[in-house]
Image (cartoon, rainbow, N blue to C red):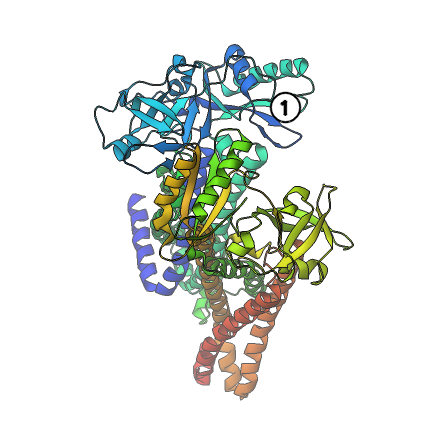
Amino acid sequence: MLSTCWLDLKLGVRMLIKYPGLALAGGAGIAVAVAIAAGGFSVIYGNFLLAALPLPAGDRIVSLEMWDSAASKAERRAQRDYRVWREELKSVAEISAFRTITPNLIVPGAQPMSVRVAAMTASGFGVARVQPLMGRYLMEDDEREGVPAVVVIGESVWRDQFGSDPAILGRTIQLGAVRHSIAGVMPEGYAFPLNHHLWVPLRTGIAPPQPLTGPELMVFGRLAPGATLAAAKAELSAIGGRAVQQFPTAYAHIQPRVMPYAYPFLGMQGKDDMAGVMAMQGLFLSLLGVVCLNVAILVYTRTATRQAEIAVRTALGASRGRIVGQLFLEALVLAAVAAAAGVGIAMIALRLVAMATQHVVSELPFWITFQLIPEAVLYAGALSVFAAAIVGIAPALRATRSDPQHGLRIIGSGGSGMRLGKTWTALIVAQVAFAVAFLPPAVSSAWEDTRDGIAGLGFPAEQYLSAQLGMDIDDAQRFAARQTELMRRLEAEPGVSGVTFSLRLPGDESNTRVEAEGVDAPPQLVRINRVDVDLFRTFDVPVLAGRALETADIASTGAVVINLSFAQKTFGGNALGRRIRYAGNEEWHQIVGIVPDFPTGVSPGMRDISLKVYHAVAPGQVRPAALAIRMRGGDPLQFSRRLREVAASVDPDLHLRYIRRLDEAMYSEQWISRLQAAVAGLVTLSVLLLSSAGIYALMSFTVSQRRKEIGIRAALGADWRRIVTSIFSRALLQLAAGAALGLALGIALEKGTAGGVMRGNAAVVLPAVALFMMLVGFLAALGPARRCLRIEPTQALREE
């Protein structure tokens, strides 16, 4: 059996060499599909479905949270519940909590920099079970009020900030306005609980808190020895029931939950989220199935030409299973080579994704990786078998279905051995219909994503420095005063020509729905931003009609400025004095001004929601605030050091994050579009190639099947024009039927998704793809038709 399989595999390699077009077209399509499926498996399974953290017994670490069913979100104000869980919950041990703060790290000789710090209970280190590199963990005594402040630092901080000083223990660093003594150093790569490299004690106070009060906390622990997740859920549910009895109003819609540790940080809040992740993996698998069906059609035509060989082998005693097995192994060679190439493509693609996400890597959980996991290689191997089954077995079963004596009689008479008739026509129609119906969405997506990835900003963003300004201390008046002072000092700097702020950077605004007074239309999506009254002046955005926002608008909240697209789409351009309100809100806002669309292209959502509304805010009313500093000349990044110094001199607790040139900050939003464009383009190209090759193969074979008919008609004196008309009328009829069916499916799909699938490009893309596929089919019929017309009539009559 082994020698037979080895012989079949060698024959499979020879067939790849004999049919290079099929090997390249089919192999490329399978390789791309396997790359997407294996890469998606690495990201989805390795980061979302794999519950174990890369820590000792990481699968035993769990998260605890309260879920507000009325608001459909987690309730993080869990200070009271954290204390109750620590005292009463027995199935989860070492229950801990943390919150992230972002103070300035102030080290002598270095510029202040905002850092992510985990304010964590000491028991959190016990949950992780990782020994410190030097010194000690945090201890419970460190959490008491009044004791000297201590900090544990990560190996990267020790190396980068202190040059790996072996005498680091006991030295002091300043976090915000508080000096901390360094108690220990954690080993390289340690970033628990999320992505942290500095840890300070979490001090929750002594007085028992009221329900749903205090700071937002993330609570976690480790399953007790012998305890299961199901047991922890049951016990926590009982504790939650007692809380409802004690505080019926506060906990009316609150249910405590326990789940694998990573789930809350990845948005995996329920069965729907899990189903969505699984559906995405299923989508990747279905893509491979579609590609393999196209390859199977190519193999089908090749197998048809081997009908004589199959009939002879059957007559000589080869069983149907033996022949099917051989054809399957031939397909397996193609699929295995393609899968190996797909694994290589996936590795390169994931490496590019990792490079593209460098700017957000500090925000990602420490267990998130963009690399091919070993399980993905095994998965790719299984996919190659799956692909070979589709590509090899279906054509083989069809080819070996007929009686061998019938096959030999056909061969003896000079036939090809396979007459497909209606089946072949159905395949052509189905292939064209599939291409016309489902390629336009891919083409539209690739085009839109490519356009988004290269879109210009529409203003000189390279002249601006952007930063996120915040303060961890919960004192709104203090923050407002400090922000005002910081902006005043920055405007006094010689190289600064203007300073402004907003809730979100331009182009990165959040969206909501609004309804317009007197307009008979459903609420529509708009982007909303709260901005400084000087924002338009600082960005040189002119007021097209009405006026800009003013200081008086801050207190009233009733005046808004909208962009031109909003005015034209909703009010036909005449928007001044009209009123709008947000869905579910009774307060009306009056439009006092209209500004141009700004910016013209930034984030992936800009193409979907170009309508904007601006509200006026004062310093301190939005936190964190997105600062934009316009420089008079030179590289704005050269001012970043001075910016940190000025902020630290105003207040050490003011922290600045994401200090970047504004164009870099805005273009960083486009990396998703560029990645989507690359993937969509690759998939579209491979499917287009396979669809074209499939149609070509089908049309070529169906015309070749009429070779003797054409020769006989020529021998009987038929005019070549009539012969050509006969050939192309049938071919064009099949193509037209497929195109019509595909257009109908495409239009239904577009209407069913309200234009979302083709993004409003259906009127252009659908006919273009239909014409292209018909052209491919026409060219496919042209070559065989020319060959058939060259047949000598006497030769055709001898064959008959």
Q: Is residue 388 visible to us here?
A: no
* Residue 473, x across and y down, in percent: 49, 29
Q: Is residue 483 left or right of residue 563?
A: left
In the rendered image, the vertical position of residue 24 relative to residue 151, given as above or below: below
Q: Position of residue 151 (x, y in %)?
A: 35, 23
Position of residue 629 relative to residue 72, above or below, is: below
Residue beneath the point at 45% across and 63% down: 689
Question: How many marks do you count on the picture?
Answer: 1
Q: SS class of the residue under badge 1?
A: strand
Task: Provide residue 764's location: percent of width, then percent of height.
Answer: 59, 68
Q: Few, some or many C-alpha atoms within 10 Å of disc 1 (few <14, some 14-19, many ≥20)?
A: many
Q: Which residue is mark 1?
A: 254
What quarter of the picture does the N terminus occupy? Answer: top left
Q: Amino acid at mark 1?
A: Ile
Residue 299 rendering spot, x and y as whole percentages: 44, 59
Residue at horizontal 46%, vertical 84%? 793
Does 653 sit above or below residue 181?
below
Left/right of residue 575 with respect to residue 232 in the rendered view: right
Please state which of residues 505 and 514 is positioned toward the viewer in this rendering.
Answer: 505
Picture quadrant of residue 249:
top right
Could you say which quadrant of the image residue 641 lies in? top left
**In the image, what residue occupies the spot 37% across and 61% down?**
24
